[in-house]
Amino acid sequence: MKGGDKRFLITGGAGFIGSNLCEAFLAEGREVVCLDNLATGLESNLADFSDHPHFRFIRGDIRDLDTCIKAMDGVDVVLHQAALGSVPRSIDDPLTTNDVNISGFLNVLEAARKSEVRRVIYAASSSTYGDSRELPKVEERIGNPLSPYAVTKLVNELYAKVYGDLYGMELIGLRYFNVFGRRQRPDGAYAAAIPRFIQAFIAGESPVIHGDGGQTRDFTYIENVIQANRLAVEVENPQALNQVYNVAYGAGTSVVDLVEMIRAALKPRLDYVGEIPLQFDPPRVGDVRDSLADVSKARRLLGYEPKYSIESGLEKAIGWYLENV
């Protein structure tokens, strides 16, 4: 823990990843300011620590520069998680995705520059690899984006490099790979796969798989993401700054295998899930076929050592959903 860093701004702090980061850094004794417009985040995600004396919630939008500047008053580090996620959402509404993910990100950078924030750590995305078929994915080699969402996350990285080069800012991008865990919403048209599958099984319904189910992903438990953010805050090696890092476990799992792992974990507690058939729908436009991260760069420069495999992460996530869904 870098001793001089007392106050953190976490944008999108009422969301899945953001709320977990709020909780983790409050537990370390930081002061945490959460900025969220609640478009996709939930105030209920903040319930466990909303009364913490070092926590402050600001309901506001990163698309407003003045709001960003006010939120950064006295802030040492920004953890930028606010974005409109989901490839399908971006295909349905590319204009709003662009406005939030690019214009909003630029506001965060500019507010941090004006406020002389020490460091900005931002959520990048594995979608940046686009149509590259190389496995595992290495940070320095990407393909062409396959969706408006992927374009916005690539532009974030370009803007971060320019701000680092021009203004001497400390910027670190973390390319998240299919993060899952507690507080990830299972509802809505753009819900992620793991919470949707878990909720379907609990409800006695067929999990819906898009495509043949053979597509692979590097599913990454939330605690690995928290670890990566902590390390990005603490790192002092100049060579580690103004870089982008893969944040994943480093193992590929097919979607069909994932569903069966969830079934196996639930069956001892809900015996009826053993008889539920799977439903296969057409593949989604813009989805990549396979994704697997090389995490050696994060290991070398940040000291990243992911502790949770998909199996150990699923066990914890399923326990949370059984209590909360």
Image (tube, rainbow, N blue to C red):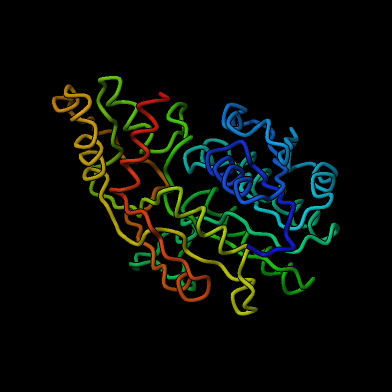
Tell me which corner region of the image, top left, top right, bottom left or bottom right, holds residue 314: top left
What is the x, y in percent for residue 149? 54, 48
What is the x, y in percent for residue 216? 29, 52
**Residue at position x 61%, y 36% in the image:** 14
Q: Nearer the viewer, residue 9 or 142?
A: 9
Tell me which corner region of the image, top left, top right, bottom left or bottom right, holds residue 212: top left
Side of 146 relative to 319 (left or right): right
Side of 7 relative to 228 (left or right): right
Q: How many marks?
A: 0
Q: Nearer the viewer, residue 179 or 23?
A: 23
Side of 229 relative to 116 (left or right): left
**Residue at position x 13%, y 25% in the image:** 275
What is the x, y in percent for residue 163? 74, 67
Compared with 67, 321 (above or below) is: above
Tell me which corner region of the image, top left, top right, bottom left or bottom right, holds residue 206: top left
What quarter of the picture does the N terminus occupy? bottom right
What quarter of the picture does the C terminus occupy? top left
What is the x, y in percent for residue 87? 48, 44
Q: Nearer the viewer, residue 155 or 298?
A: 298
Outermost residue, left side: 275
**Residue at position x 22%, y 27% in the image:** 269
Side of 158 relative to 265 (left or right): right
**Residue at position x 67%, y 47% in the image:** 10
